[in-house]
């Protein structure tokens, strides 16, 4: 048995007793003889986080990240489970790759890993993948993330398949003809710095398309990593109209703007791009009013040589180890939302969207638990990341909310800066 003593659980100081993978008592617990006792005075207990949008890169791009390094980063960030995107090599478009990912994750034995399979074979946007076989093999959702499904008829058929198999379809919304070789957000910063810009419309046109298709088919669709004021407005209006649309955003869209790219910093290059302050504020409002269903990392690690000059740099931010701190600092500590709401956005909601179990700190709940120090102020230091990807625009950024311990299925996987 493990007994966590004197933790703050949403404003109430409690002891949490864990036996096996289950929370067996929450309240005033007298540890039995032989129990492992963890002193949690001054710490906050939360259900461990669920990330429904990460890139673990394995198989095929292990030089960027692999399942083991990605899972180390996950538990260091307070995550008990991650859902990995299919843009691997080969693409996760068949049951053999799905089974490989699940088997390798079980061998690593840190965070739980749930594969997301491709919508189309090879992510080429043409032939629909075998949804039934992929779901049976263990895929929890379908996405061509990293690429849009550009043909509307193909997306319509994919949504029909997803409806038939009761599967979540996650759309990477990007109209490539409107991206037109852009590298950062179209606006003052791009013009001033001499970079080709990417219009907000490149995201919003595809968001609108997916909403119209979901409405026409009376089925659900999930919009990945929204970044603009217009996307938030479209989704908000669609929800009010009863259309089955959900969406996610990432910490970099409410904690940063395209100003980080003003000096050509390649670490600030991400897809969709960092936007302007009005978009950042609009994303926060969308989080507040329930338009945004989940906060994800879109963890996209890259090797150092792939983050050279901004024009040629790969898109992506290594986000698993900064997600909670950025979200706590910019959403909770700022007063925008409560800690309980943040917990819902980072754990319960994403888990429910993809249909996987999540921790619950109550008697009988799954013992996936994170202990965090909300008062610890520190600077982001990518050199200390467990991820192979050190690519973050937040280097040196002061944040609050340090993950002290992560428990997965009743087993401590990370504690005091060390993988267990």
Image (tube, rainbow, N blue to C red):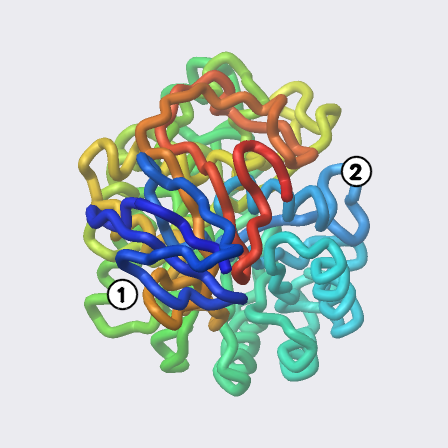
Task: Decide: few, some or many residues near mark 1? Use Cα within 10 Å; few <14, some 14-19, many ≥20.
Answer: many
Pick the front one: 216 or 167: 167
Residue at screen point 40% across, 74% down? 220
Pick the front one: 29 or 400: 29
Residue at screen point 41% across, 81% down? 217
Residue at screen point 64% across, 83% down? 132
Mark 2 to mark 1: distance in Å? 41 Å
Task: Decide: few, some or many residues near mark 2? Use Cα within 10 Å; few <14, some 14-19, many ≥20.
Answer: few
Question: Which residue matches tag 1?
Answer: 238
Pick the front one: 391 or 417: 417
Disc 1 element: helix
Residue at the farthest front position = 33
User: Residue 151 appears at what percent x and percent y?
Assistant: 57, 65
User: Residue 11 appears at what percent x and percent y?
Assistant: 20, 46
The image quarter in which residue 216 lies: bottom left
Pick the front one: 206 or 349: 349
């Amino acid at each position: 048995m493990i007994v966590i003593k004197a933790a703050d659980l949403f404003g109430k100081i409690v002891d949490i007793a864990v036996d096996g993978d289950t929370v067996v008592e929450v309240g005033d617990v007298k540890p039995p003889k032989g129990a492992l006792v963890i002193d949690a005075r001054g710490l906050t207990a939360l259900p461990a986080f669920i990330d429904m949008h990460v890139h673990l890169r394995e198989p095929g791009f292990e030089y960027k990240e692999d399942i083991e390094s990605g899972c180390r980063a996950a538990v260091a960030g307070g995550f008990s489970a991650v859902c990995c995107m299919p843009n691997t090599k080969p693409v996760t478009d068949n049951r053999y790759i799905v089974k490989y990912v699940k088997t390798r994750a079980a061998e690593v034995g840190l965070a739980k890993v749930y594969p997301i399979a491709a919508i189309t074979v090879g992510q080429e946007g043409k032939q629909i993948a075998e949804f039934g076989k992929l779901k049976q093999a263990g895929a929890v959702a379908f996405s061509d993330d990293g690429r849009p499904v550009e043909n509307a008829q193909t997306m319509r058929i994919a949504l029909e398949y997803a409806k038939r198999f009761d599967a979540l379809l996650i759309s990477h919304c990007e109209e490539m003809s409107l991206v037109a070789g852009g590298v950062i957000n179209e606006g003052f910063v791009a013009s001033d710095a001499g970079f080709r810009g990417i219009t907000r419309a490149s995201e919003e046109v595809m968001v609108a398309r997916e909403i119209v298709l979901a409405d026409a088919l009376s089925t659900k669709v999930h919009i990945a990593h929204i970044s603009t004021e217009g996307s938030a407005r479209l989704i908000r209006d669609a929800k009010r109209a009863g259309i089955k649309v959900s969406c996610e955003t990432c910490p970099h869209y409410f904690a940063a703007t395209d100003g980080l790219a003003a000096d050509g910093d390649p670490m600030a290059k991400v897809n969709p791009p960092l936007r302007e302050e009005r978009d950042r504020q609009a994303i926060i409002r969308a989080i507040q009013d329930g338009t945004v269903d989940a906060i994800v990392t879109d963890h996209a690690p890259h090797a150092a040589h792939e983050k050279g000059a901004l024009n040629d740099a790969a898109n992506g931010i290594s986000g698993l180890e900064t997600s909670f701190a950025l979200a706590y600092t910019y959403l909770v500590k700022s007063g925008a939302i409560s800690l309980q709401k943040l917990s819902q956005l980072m754990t319960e909601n994403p888990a429910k969207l993809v249909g996987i179990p999540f921790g619950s700190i109550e008697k009988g709940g799954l013992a996936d638990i994170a202990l965090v120090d909300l008062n610890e102020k520190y600077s982001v230091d990518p050199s200390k990341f467990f991820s192979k990807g050190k690519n973050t625009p937040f280097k040196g950024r002061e944040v609050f909310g340090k993950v002290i311990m992560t428990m997965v299925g009743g087993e401590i996987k990370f504690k005091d800066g060390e993988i267990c």
